[in-house]
Amino acid sequence: MTTDLLPLVLAAFSGGVVALLLTLFGGGGSVLAVPLLLYVVGVADPHVAIGVSAAGVALNALTALAGHARAGRVRWPCATLFAVTGAAGAWIGSSLAKMIDGQQLLLIFAVAMAAVGLSMLRPRLAVVRPEPRLNLAIAPRVGLAGAGVGSAAGFFGIGGGFLIVPGLMASTGMSLATAQATSLLSVAAFGATTAGNYALSGWVDAGLVAAMTAGGVVGTVAGLPLARRLGANAGLGRSLFAGMILIVAVYVAIRAVMAL
C-alpha cells in the first residue's frame, strides 16, 4: 500500500479532476482515471492502475447513487437484474484482462477511450417515455444486456456508464434520465467486481484508492456550482471534453506502442 505523501497527493488531485469532470459532463470522465494514475501519479503497472481506477469508480458511483435513490429516480428491479448479471460478466471480462500483457491491455484500453469520446459527441435527446416495470417479457433482454455490458466493462476496467445507459434504454425502454440514474448501481457493481478480481492478484493499492476517493469528494462539491453555471454552454463543454478524451486516447496508444 502506498504511504508516500507525493503519490497520495497526486492521486487525490487525480480523483478530484475525474469527479469534477464527471459532475460537469456526466459519463465518460472515469476513463481518465487510468491515464492519470499512470502518467501523473506514476503507477508503474497498468494492471494496478486499472484495479485502483475500478475501485475508485465503484465508490464514487455509490455516492452518486445515494442521491438519485433519495430522489426516487432509480428503477430498482431493472437495476438489480442488470447489475447482477453484469457483475458475473465483469468477473469474466476482468479475468481475461488479467491474462493480457499490461502494455497490450493499455493499447486496447486506448481504443475503449476513443469509443467513449466518440459516444460523447453524439447528441443526447431526452425522450419522454413511460417508465418500465420488470416482467417476464423483458427480463431475458435485461439480463443478457447486463452480462454483455458487464463483460466489456470488466475487460476494459472502466465504469461502463457509456454502455450501461444505452443498454438499459434498449432492453427496458426507459428514458435517458431514468437510465442515467439507474445505471449507477451497475457502475458500482461492475467496478467493485473488477476491483475485487484485481485485488486477488495484489493489483489494488488501498492507499491510492482512499486518496482518489477523498479527492473525488472535493471534486464533486466543486463541480456542482460550476455545472449550474454552464447552462447553455454545456453541449460545447461536453464536446470539448470528448475531444480531450480522444487526445488522451491517442497519447495512451502511442505510449503503449512505444513500450511494447
Image (spheres, rainbow, N blue to C red):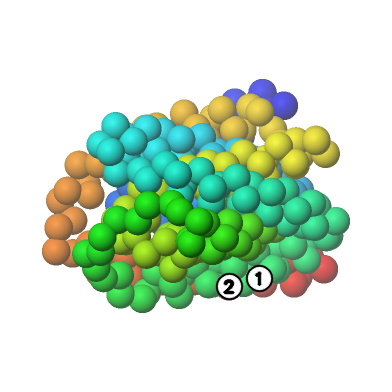
Q: Residue at x 75, y 41 (%)?
A: 197
Question: Counting other residues with Cα less than 10 Å from the Cα at mark 1, is it few (<14), some (14-19), or many (20 or more)?
Answer: many
Q: Position of residue 113 (x, y in %)?
A: 55, 66
Task: Give the side of residue 157 with respect to residue 132, left or right.
Answer: right
Q: CA distance from mark 2 to mark 1?
A: 5 Å
Give the amino acid at mark 1.
Ala
Look at the image and tell me in which quarter the C terminus lies.
bottom right
Q: On the image, numbered disc 1 is attached to which residue?
A: 253
Q: Residue at x 29, y 32 (%)?
A: 70
Asked if residue 40 can be seen in this view, the reply is no
Element type at mark 1: helix
The front one of 182 and 62 is 182
Q: Residue at x 35, y 43 (%)?
A: 74
Task: Give the side of residue 232 with respect to residue 168, left or right.
Answer: left
Instruction: Look at the numbered discs 2 and 1 and tell me whether their residues touch, using CB distance below 8 Å.
Output: yes
Q: Quadrant of residue 198?
A: top right
Q: Residue at x 75, y 53 (%)?
A: 92
Q: Position of residue 218 (x, y in %)?
A: 37, 32
Look at the image and tell me in which quarter the N terminus lies.
top right
Q: On the image, numbered disc 2 is attached to which residue?
A: 250
